């Protein structure tokens, strides 16, 4: 049997623009029935999301999951904090790094693994300054120009 690819539902492109991603961690998401149906339909927004640790549990705040159209009274609040499922040691390690280094925990993407479970990729991130953002953009533009000129050169 061939191994399936992970199906990405949503990505937080703004996080890669605003932060340096130092490490990434995979976490399960505790969702209710109508929420998982909305996620499968792609009705998810991670743009202004962040994670924090409260009472030894990791919560994802600011994750917007649109209400399921057929869900009626079973729909949950779209902006409610979603609990992330990780090992206790990982949560404590992340909490220590956030307090010591001044980093932030940012959701980077939501995807379904090969077993059909919803997972969230959480990044341990450090904020970028404006000059860092300009430098990253300049590198990306230079790389794009190099690829464009190579493609044109190889065309003939």
Image (cartoon, rainbow, N blue to C red):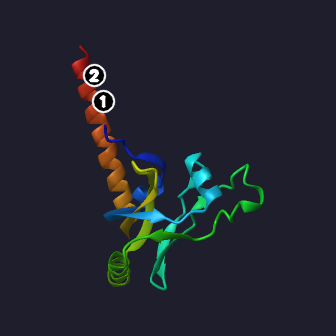
The count of marks equals: 2
Question: Disc 1 designates what residue?
Answer: 148
Q: Which residue is farthest top? A: 156
CB atoms of marks 2 and 1 within 8 Å: yes
On-image quarter of the N terminus: top left
Residue pictured at 64% horizontal, 66% vertical = 79
Q: Quadrant of residue 27?
A: bottom left
Q: Residues within 10 Å of mark 1 (few under 14, many from 20)?
A: few
Residue in the image at 37% along x and 55% along y = 134
Q: Is residue 7 above or below residue 67?
A: above
Which residue is the site of mark 2? 152
Left or right: 42 in relation to 132? right
In the depicted structure, whether residue 33 falls above or below residue 145: below
Give the image quarter of residue 95. Answer: bottom left
Which residue is outermost to the front? 1
* Residue 33 shows in the view: yes
Element at badge 2? helix
From the viewer's perspective, is 7 left or right of 74?
A: left
Q: Is residue 48 above or below residue 37?
A: below
Would you call the spot at circle 2 few (<14 residues within 10 Å), some (14-19), or many (20 or more)?
few
Measuring from the top left, give residue 126's x and y in whole percent: 36, 69
Q: Position of residue 57 (x, y in %)?
A: 47, 79
Q: Residue at x 27, y 33 (%)?
A: 147
Residue in the picture at 33% in, 48% down: 138
Q: Which mark is residue 80?
A: none
């Amino acid at each position: 049997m061939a191994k399936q690819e992970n199906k990405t539902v949503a990505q937080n492109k703004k996080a890669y623009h605003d932060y340096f991603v130092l490490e990434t961690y995979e976490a399960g998401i505790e969702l209710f029935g109508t929420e998982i149906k909305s996620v499968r339909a792609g009705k998810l927004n991670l743009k202004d999301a962040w994670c924090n640790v409260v009472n030894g549990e990791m919560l994802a705040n600011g994750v917007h999951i649109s209400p399921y159209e057929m869900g009626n009274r079973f729909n949950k609040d779209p902006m409610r904090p979603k609990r992330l499922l990780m090992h206790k040691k990982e949560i404590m390690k992340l909490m220590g790094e956030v307090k010591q280094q001044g980093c932030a925990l940012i959701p980077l993407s939501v995807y379904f693994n090969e077993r059909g479970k919803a997972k969230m990729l959480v990044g341990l991130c450090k904020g970028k300054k404006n000059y860092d953002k300009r430098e990253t953009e300049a590198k990306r533009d230079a790389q794009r120009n190099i690829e464009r000129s190579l493609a044109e050169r190889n065309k003939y």
